[in-house]
């Protein structure tokens, strides 16, 4: 009886052990399959020996003595780190990124040299003929013009000399659908002659779209020095004339009097504008180079082409804020420079700074140096020590006083009511977890414009972060956020807030005045030659931008990649071009740009800066 019970129990134990062994075997098999799948999926087949070594180490860990365990842990850790690094190399392919970087760098140099060599060679051949020498003379005059009328006159002569006037007269082109455009133009002209206002409204409402039939092709506007093809200009003029016919028409009989009522025409223009979209002028950051925007603004105002929607970041916000509070006539008077305070940048070293930050050994060397040399050396040491302790170089008080004198205490809403301009300023919160904000009369109506511009100009480590100020119900200036939030440069993370402008104001055509010193390096344009870079280089640049952005989102927080509190990821990966990109600093020497990026303009240099912007 006892033996039977023992036998029965041993059978149960054996079955239990067998089940455990099968379960363990199944778990090991699943783990093995999972590891094999991971090795295959990640491309680590060439490192399978390393994986097997780690597995063997884990299997034999139970046979280790206490003295061998420390060495085992060290070997296992080293093998795991090696496997992790090799996995990252296979998955993230940093060697491919490095090859892209080297290829882009070499292509950039080759393309720049090619552009310079091609221009020099072309000029050499032109000097061999009378026609060529006249062409060179006209090109030189075109670069030195001082008025728009003078430019158009010289450009017209140059077009005739180079045969571009015949290109303009010939409607045929593979760059756009010219036949459909010509048919549309004839239809609008016929409807105007028949005085069919209802038909015009129907056709305009259905067919007026931006960049229709290839009209947005940049090549159409870069061949001639004066304009584009006559057929395109005729089409655009006909559209404007047709809109004017609708505007001035009135119902003359019972059939169309209701359809041409003021309310219906207002609805027609409102809906058509919304469908067509709006244009916006965007002024980039760029330190003291932001003053080149003034020439662009002046040229647009003089030709009645300044869009109502204007956005500015960092230095661009200074110019945007200055024109936000002024009418067109006041803008032209202001841009003459007679009433501009150019002292935007100043270190403002106080007596307290001299006591706190000046090294003691400088006092003993004062007699050995001239007064000027001593002051330069003293200021350099004070600024360095202040930067190391407080993390800023320039004092915000100097910039604040200058901005306030230029813009006054207008809020975004007050400026909009006065001039009708929709001015936008980009600011970045000091917290790395928050996003840049676009301030305007809708999102921040009570914020004071000079305060927003001051925050947008607060470059990390150059200026201290600042608070936004606003007007309360009684007109008193108070902090906009009672929590005491600090804000800094808006250009670093969002130089051109295109998406937000599209959401708020239906903008779909962006005119960018770009003066950032790093713009040509990270964009698809050459630094010394004119025009776009090669398609291969653009491909490499886009691939690298996408790689950096995805790596940051995958495993590295953007704030980890900050250098001196400057977000490198958005600085490199954001977009710097628009539908039309104007670069006022194109003709300026690179060394001059580097030397003056943080230097105030003077009354003597400002006219040249203004003229360079106008010529662009």
Image (cartoon, helix red, strand yellow):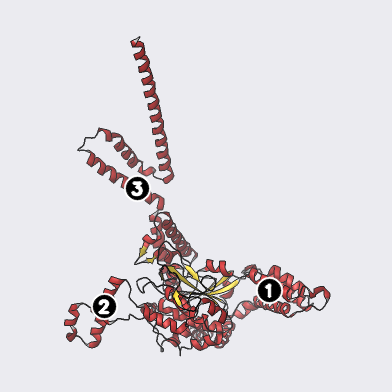
Q: Is residue 445 above or below residue 130?
A: above
Q: Residues under labels 2 and 3: Cα distance? A: 47 Å
Question: Percent from the top left, x then y, of residue 514?
Answer: 47, 74
In the image, 343 versus 63, the foreground residue is 343
Residue 516 appears in the rendering = no
Q: For mark 2, give the secondary structure.
A: helix
Structural crowding at the residue carrying mark 2, measured as other residues with C-alpha within 10 Å and reported as few (<14), some (14–19) or many (≥20): many
Residue at the bottom extreme of this rendering: 338
Question: Percent from the top left, x then y, of residue 43?
Answer: 41, 45
Structural crowding at the residue carrying mark 1, measured as other residues with C-alpha within 10 Å and reported as few (<14), some (14–19) or many (≥20): some
Q: Residue at x 43, y 64 (%)?
A: 570
Q: Is residue 11 above or below residue 234?
A: above
Are the residues flagged by discs 2 and 3 in contact, CB closer than 8 Å? no
Q: For mark 3, give the secondary structure.
A: helix
- Find disc 1 in the rendering and name its residue: 269
Question: Percent from the top left, x then y, of residue 532?
Answer: 50, 70
- Find disc 3 in the rendering and name its residue: 84
Q: Residue at x 69, y 68 (%)?
A: 207
Q: Is residue 145 above or below residue 534?
A: below
Residue 567 appears in the rendering = yes
- Find disc 2 in the rendering and name its residue: 382
């Amino acid at each position: 009886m006892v033996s039977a019970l023992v036998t029965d129990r041993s059978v149960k134990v054996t079955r239990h052990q067998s089940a455990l062994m099968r379960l363990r075997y199944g778990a090991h098999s699943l783990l093995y399959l999972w590891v094999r799948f991971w090795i295959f999926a990640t491309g680590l087949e060439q490192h399978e020996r390393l994986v097997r070594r780690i597995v063997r180490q884990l299997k034999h860990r139970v046979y280790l003595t206490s003295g061998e365990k420390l060495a085992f842990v060290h070997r296992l850790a080293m093998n795991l780190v090696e496997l992790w690094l090799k996995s990252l190399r296979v998955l993230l392919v940093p060697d491919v990124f490095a090859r892209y970087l080297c290829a882009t760098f070499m292509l950039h140099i080759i393309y720049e040299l090619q552009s310079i060599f091609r221009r020099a060679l072309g000029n050499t051949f032109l000097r061999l003929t009378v026609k060529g020498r006249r062409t060179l003379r006209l090109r030189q005059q075109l670069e030195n013009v001082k008025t728009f009328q003078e430019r158009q006159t010289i450009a017209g002569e140059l077009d005739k000399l180079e045969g571009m006037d015949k290109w303009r007269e010939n409607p045929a082109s593979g760059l756009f659908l010219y036949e459909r455009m010509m048919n549309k133009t004839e239809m609008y002209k016929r409807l105007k002659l028949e005085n069919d206002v209802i038909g015009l409204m129907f056709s305009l409402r259905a067919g007026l779209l931006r960049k229709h039939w290839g009209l947005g092709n940049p090549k159409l506007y870069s061949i001639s020095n004066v304009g584009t093809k006559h057929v395109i200009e005729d089409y655009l003029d006909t559209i404007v004339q047709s809109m004017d016919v609708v505007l001035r028409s009135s119902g003359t009989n019972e059939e169309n009097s209701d359809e041409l009522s003021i309310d219906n025409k207002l609805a027609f223009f409102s809906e058509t504008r919304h469908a067509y979209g709006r244009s916006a002028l965007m002024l980039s950051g760029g330190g003291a180079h932001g003053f080149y925007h003034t020439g662009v603004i002046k040229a647009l105002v003089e030709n009645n082409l300044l869009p109502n929607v204007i956005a500015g970041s960092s230095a661009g916000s200074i110019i945007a804020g200055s024109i936000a509070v002024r009418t067109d006539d006041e803008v032209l008077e202001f841009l003459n420079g007679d009433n501009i305070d150019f002292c935007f940048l100043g270190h403002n070293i106080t007596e307290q700074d001299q006591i706190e930050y000046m090294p003691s050994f400088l006092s003993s060397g004062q007699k050995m140096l001239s007064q000027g040399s001593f002051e330069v050396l003293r200021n350099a040491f004070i600024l360095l020590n202040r930067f190391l302790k407080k993390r800023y170089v320039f004092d915000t008080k100097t910039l604040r006083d200058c901005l306030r004198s230029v813009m006054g205490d207008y809020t975004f809403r007050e400026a909009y009511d006065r001039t009708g301009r929709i001015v936008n300023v980009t600011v970045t919160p000091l917290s790395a977890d928050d996003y840049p904000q676009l301030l305007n009369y809708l999102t921040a109506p009570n914020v004071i414009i000079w305060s927003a511009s001051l925050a947008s100009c607060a470059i990390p480590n150059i200026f201290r972060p600042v608070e936004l100020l606003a007007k309360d119900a009684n007109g008193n200036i108070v902090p906009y956020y009672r929590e005491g939030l600090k804000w800094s440069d808006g250009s670093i993370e969002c130089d051109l807030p295109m998406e937000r402008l599209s959401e708020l104001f239906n903008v779909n055509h962006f005119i960018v005045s770009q003066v950032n010193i790093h713009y040509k390096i990270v964009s698809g344009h050459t630094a010394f030659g004119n025009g776009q870079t090669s398609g291969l280089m653009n491909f490499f640049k886009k691939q690298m931008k996408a790689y950096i952005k995805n790596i940051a989102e995958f495993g590295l927080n953007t704030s980890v990649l900050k250098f001196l509190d400057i977000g490198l990821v958005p600085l490199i990966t954001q977009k710097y071009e628009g539908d039309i990109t104007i670069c006022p600093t194109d003709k300026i020497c690179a060394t001059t740009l580097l030397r003056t990026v943080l230097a105030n303009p003077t009354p003597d240099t400002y006219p040249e800066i203004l003229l360079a912007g106008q010529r662009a």
